Image (tube, helix red, strand yellow):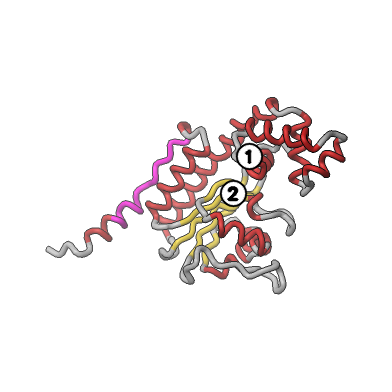
Amino acid sequence: MNDSNEPASRREAETNMPFEVDTASVRTEYELLHLMRRLISRYGYAHFLIARLPLADEQRFSERLVLSNWPAELVRQYDAGETFQTSVLVERLRQTKLPVTGGPELMEAARKGAGKASVRRLPPHSDMAHFAVLLHTTYGEPFVVMLSGTRGEPAGAELATLYLTLVQLFECLERTFDAGGGAREKLSSREIECLRWAAAGKSSDEIAIILGISAYTVSSYFKSATRKLDAVNRMQAIARAIRMKLI
């Protein structure tokens, strides 16, 4: 009896088994993050991301990200290059309801001259492949869910199972949005104003002039808003406030 193919056969069998998601038990982003890591491990991927579909060229990649295990340096490169919002991936997702698959070319600018700088592909393997779907919240907001790795393109029953699993996980994510709705009551109107102006690119000094308060007071509002949103810094607080539709 030849056991050389047994590990591969076992992996194939596990991949074809349903990935069980107890949607009712997932309440936090941390729990969802754990499930996403289990998912990519099961299906042989290395990276995942969930991000709002860019609505305009000027929107930064980091501000669209909701959940991912991408390296921070790579996220900064996409911000600097401004290529994600003009990428082949985003353009193709806007044109179909079916999963989009492909190699590194998906993350390149769809139009000549789009973007400001070249970006190292994710993460620096020339054979990295992507599997992406476009999903919508109950209110119609579009999101990109993407898995990346060096494995082959999913097909048949595996593709269907993977797609259904991503829909279930996305439903869990939307529930965490609803759970965070109470933050609107916790944040003061001034805290929300400061976050809104910061999201528009204004500095603390500029916000102070706009609101007619001191820069020190603006800083205090940011600190309290960051704490209430359970964020680690101002940028994360802004991202969470956007995600919760507070600003």
Q: Position of residue 214 (x, y in %)?
A: 82, 35
- Front in this rendered view, residue 41 or 201: 201
**Side (left or right) of 26 relative to 245:** left
Report which quarter residue 79 is drawn in.
bottom right
- Front in this rendered view, residue 119 or 204: 204
Q: Residue at x 60, y 38 (%)?
A: 231
Q: Quadrant of the C terminus?
A: top right
Q: Is residue 139 magenta?
A: no
At label 2, the amino acid type is Leu
Q: Which mark is on residue 138?
A: 1
Q: Residue at x 71, y 36 (%)?
A: 222
Q: Residue at x 75, y 44 (%)?
A: 198
Q: Residue at x 74, y 45 (%)?
A: 199
Q: Position of residue 35 (x, y in %)?
A: 44, 43
Magenta span? 11-23
Q: Position of residue 64 (x, y in %)?
A: 64, 50
Q: Quadrant of the N terminus?
A: bottom left
SS for dot 2: strand
Q: Position of residue 98 (x, y in %)?
A: 56, 57
Report which quarter residue 72 is drawn in.
bottom right
- Rate crowding at label 1 as few (under 14), some (14 to 19) or many (20 or more) other CA atoms within 10 Å: few
Q: Is residue 14 magenta?
A: yes
Q: Which residue is mark 2?
A: 135
Q: Is residue 247 above or below residue 183?
A: below
Look at the image and tell me whether residue 95 can be seen.
no
Report which quarter residue 138 is drawn in.
top right
At label 1, the amino acid type is Thr
